[in-house]
Amino acid sequence: MYSYLGLLLWFGLFGCGGGDFSVSNTSYEPRLVIEGLLRPGVGVEGIRITRNVRVDERIRGDGLIPADVQVHLTDGASGRSYALALREADRVEDRLFYYPGSDLQIVPGGTYALEVSASVDGTPLRARAVTTVPEAGFRIDEVNRPAMPYRPLDEGGDPINFTLSIERSPSSRFYLLTLRPRVATSANFVYENPFTQQSRQDVEDRLDEFRFRWDWIQNTPSEGGISTIEVSWFDLWFYGDYDAYVYAADENYARFIQTHDQVQEADGNFHEADFTVEGDGIGYFGSALVDSVRLQVLR
């Protein structure tokens, strides 16, 4: 969900208990920040490479991407290495690395290695990450109801949910669901929901919070077969059409999704997310098979 997750900002933290902590910049170490997801059938695009910064450092957007960065992707089957290019854009978050040719194909079951080198604060850095794309076989098999009124109840008074039946990939045990309303404004917000009371201004102020929703299922059987994903009404905040995307994720992406927002323990201590990047890098480099279906919430 990608999805979907923002720029990664990392810093050294010390102390525990309550909400108090002290910050020491002496522990700062320059790192390359990698955010990349490969998908079969769409080419190599949308790989973000930036750098970390000190917690007290102010850096302009242009400075987040090292000037001398080099990015290569190696196909494990052929051993061939491909140089990725930086797509220029006005906003730094849209400056992503991609492969401009058509001779590199991402295929189910394939293994790919990403290698990044750059200098940050005068220090030469190198990072490497490897992903194996889940095997073919994954698809959304069916949806119980493609359209229904907002949160209908059954005879027992329980809500009836959208339910997606998926055919699993034999090599993925983690399936990420993202929901994208085609129209998301304060005009088609579901104000009569049972979860919260919001004014029109509240919705406009928090629009992205309601618009970008995701969930997952995990620990599914390690072979092909059918599993189900229920779509919670807590994740459907607008009337109208939705694109529901399901990702059959590799281990790298699954581990990052499961840990990226769980970085503070109950006693206040902080720790990093579960990275699978070797060398001088943090972040994630994973892969997934993707399928989608349209859902409709009726007024």
Image (cartoon, rainbow, N blue to C red):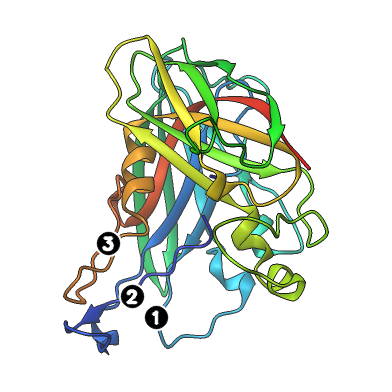
Name the amino acid, label 3. Glu
Q: CA distance from mark 1 to mark 2?
A: 6 Å
Residue drawn at 29 percent across, 77 percent down: 28
Q: CA distance from mark 3 to mark 2?
A: 10 Å
Name the amino acid, label 2. Phe
Residue drawn at 46 percent across, 29 percent down: 229
Graded by Cα atoms within 10 Å as few (under 14), some (14 to 19) or many (20 or more), the crowding at tag 3 reads some
Q: Quickly name the residue at label 3.
A: 272
What is the x, y in percent for residue 126? 35, 53
Q: Quickly name the residue at label 2.
A: 11
Name the amino acid, label 1. Arg
Pointers 1 and 2 in contact (C-beta within 8 Å): yes
Q: Quickly name the residue at label 1.
A: 54
Residue furthest to the right in view is 187
First reached walking from the N terminus: tag 1 or tag 3: 1
What is the x, y in percent for residue 51? 46, 65
